[in-house]
Amino acid sequence: MITAFHDFVAWLPTGLPAYLFLITVVVFVHEMGHFLVARACGVAVEVFSIGFGGEIFGWNDRHGTRWRVSWIPFGGYVKFLGDLGVASTPDVSRLGGLSDMERSHAFPFRPLWQRAAVVAAGPFANFVLAIAIFTVTFLIYGQNLNAPVVDSVVPGSAAASAGIHKGDLIQKVDGSPVRDFMDLKQAVTMSAGQPMAIALERDGRMMTVHVTPKIMEMKDPFGGIDRSYALGITNRIEASRLTHVSYGPVEAFGAACGQTWMIVKGTMVYVWQMIAGYADTSQLRGPLGMATVSQKVAEISFGALVSLIALLSVSIGLINLFPIPLLDGGHLLYYAFEAVLGRPLGARVQDVGFRVGLAMVLGLMLLVTWNDLVRLNLF
């Protein structure tokens, strides 16, 4: 515990500002998406909060919205007129007492398409933020591609069993070209352990080997242990292997969209692997884990921290679209039922759904917090 306390004290000077910057930007953009579309649809916004719990400071704008910064920096919310709380559940007892003017601006009484647009705007804003960051990054710095040359093969690994040798140049995976070693790593990670056909060049000759990735434990860049599918090969960065690619505005935007899609695809594949039992949940990080990562990334450079914002923004946007009551995706699921039935789901059904969603979200928070504590060697 003494070591953990010393680590916490050492984390404070750079880790706390980096984490607060990271989470504030992502949450602000997400909630601003909800806010702007709500205002455009004529919905009255009562509260715009960064963080949960008690207010640290705040102010009221000319429309009557209370802008606040709260004590618990694990998220945020926008509360509309007619909401019961931060989860946007209808305040049934209050709705009956609203005047006609107030009802016209209350969220529950807006047309279905407007409510769906307001809810979807938060995750959409997260994707826009990520694409914007990646576009600017590609436009300014371009991209360095590291040739996928095999520098070593782990004995007993999938690569060793398939006959992959040191010096092999990977050309294709299941027919898809591989330009960068990270392309290969991502393809293997998302393989779910299924056999792969790898075309490679060896001593000027082309050949194809078939390999089945295995689960391996490796250290990640942040000191943790990563368990994922791997071939068991290493690659190093050398100037002679790097190819610099410059982008114009259109090409940078296209590359940014592709990068964002790969993050979405990778996340969805990982979720499916967990459900199917191919991957465990120990790799999930919570707020404590993100705080640790943000410190180490901030120590690299401010640009690296901004790139982490893009990655986190995509993850937050995608997670919020999961069809779990309490999340944005859960609200959209309810609206889909409403569109099909021609009426909202009953109050009892919605209440049960929100309770189940709350239990799922709290369970996930407990899981990722436990993972963080174990990763930090506190248990």
Image: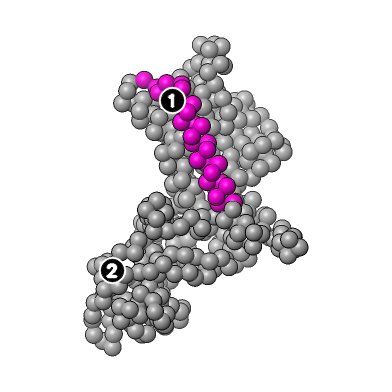
Horizontal and vertical percent position of residue 185? 39, 68
Above or below: residue 243 compared with residue 260: below
x%, y% of residue 200? 28, 78
- Three-letter code, disc 2: Met
Q: Looking at this view, name the residue that lies furthest to the bottom.
A: 203
Q: Please tell me in which quadrant of the rendered image residue 291 appears.
A: bottom right
**Who's the residue at 64% across and 51% down the image?**
20
Number of marks in picture = 2
Q: Which residue is mark 2?
A: 196
Task: Say what amino acid the circle numbered 1 marks.
Answer: Val
Residue 290 visible in the picture:
no
State the predominant SS element of the stretch in magenta: helix
- Where 132 falls versus 211 (above or below)? above
The N terminus is located in which quarter?
Answer: bottom right
Mark 1 surroundings: few (<14), some (14-19) or many (≥20) residues within 10 A: few
Colour basis: one colour
At a point 41% along the width and 81% down the height, the residue shown is 155
Q: Using residue 44 as the reference point, say whether residue 270 is left or right of it.
A: left
* Residue at 48%, 55% in the rendered image: 281
Magenta residues, start to end: 343-369
x then y, percent, for residue 264: 40, 52
Residue 349 marker: 1
* Residue 284 magenta-highlighted: no
First along the sequence among labels 1 and 2: 2
Residue 355 is inside the magenta segment: yes
Q: Quadrant of the C terminus?
A: bottom right
